[in-house]
Amino acid sequence: GQNIDQPTEMTATEGAIVQINCTYQTSGFNGLFWYQQHAGEAPTFLSYNVLDGLEEKGRFSSFLSRSKGYSYLLLKELQMKDSASYLCAVSPPGGGNKLTFGTGTQLKVEL
Amino acid sequence: DAGVIQSPRHEVTEMGQEVTLRCKPISGHNSLFWYRQTMMRGLELLIYFNNNVPIDDSGMPEDRFSAKMPNASFSTLKIQPSEPRDSAVYFCASSFTQETQYFGPGTRLLVL
């Protein structure tokens, strides 16, 4: 089975940096996705990590440690529009399509 | 390019009625997924198709739920009879082989 843990809520200040953690215990693992979901909208893809290390994409970076079952999403230069839920999801061995999602971290960016 | 299209966007129905949700995946994608999202349980995979064939329906709650994909550009999720506990947002997503999934806008279902 799959067990994915994320903090339920986080609050940060505009312009700051925030790190959202995700830990997982799975019977098999290929890679980890991060999605962003604004209230009332669909999840949108942010990043995908298969190998250990940091992947940087503009203001957003994602890190993976396969041996530790751990990932984080790093958001820099926070903007008000970054207030959203951030979902991590794991994909099974061999890649494959069946993602298992965490319950999401609700990020609130304040002035 | 058009993304994943879902209809209706909102549905209010009474308990016992049949509900049909529709999805048109992104052209060229060969995998289609149906998810349900609630506050209590988060985003759950109900069923997914590869090349129009159902691969894994282990997330379908019970026999009241059924899904079909008659061709590469159309899928339906049907609930019959509907119950208040089925109230949720239902998302359809599509992908090409094992790549990133792209979500539709969702159908907000309320069963009274």
Image (cartoon, coloured by chain):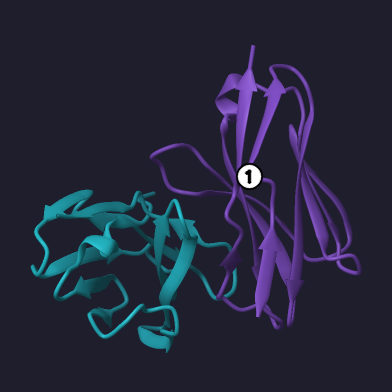
Chain colours: A purple, B cyan
* Quadrant in the picture for residue B6: bottom left
| Residue B50 appears left or right of A35 | left
Q: How many marks?
A: 1
| Residue A90 appears left or right of B9 | right
**Which part of the image, by quadrant, shows the C terminus of chain A?**
top right
x and y, in percent, of residue A63 in the image? 83, 51
- Could you tell me the amino acid type at mark 1? Thr
Q: Residue at x 59, y 74 (%)?
A: B98
Foreground of the two, B107 or B24: B107
User: Does B50 appear above or below B79?
Assistant: below
User: Does A21 appear above or below A66?
Assistant: above
x and y, in percent, of residue B62 in the image? 31, 82
Residue count near mark 1 (Cα–Cα under 10 Å), binned few <14, some 14–19, many ≥20: few
x and y, in percent, of residue A69 in the image? 83, 65
Q: Residue at x 36, y 56 (%)?
A: B4
Q: Residue at x 46, y 55 (%)?
A: B40
* Quadrant in the picture for residue B38: bottom left
User: Does B9 appear above or below A49?
Assistant: above
* Quadrant in the picture for residue B68: bottom left
In the picture of the structure, the residue carrying the numbered disc 1 is A8
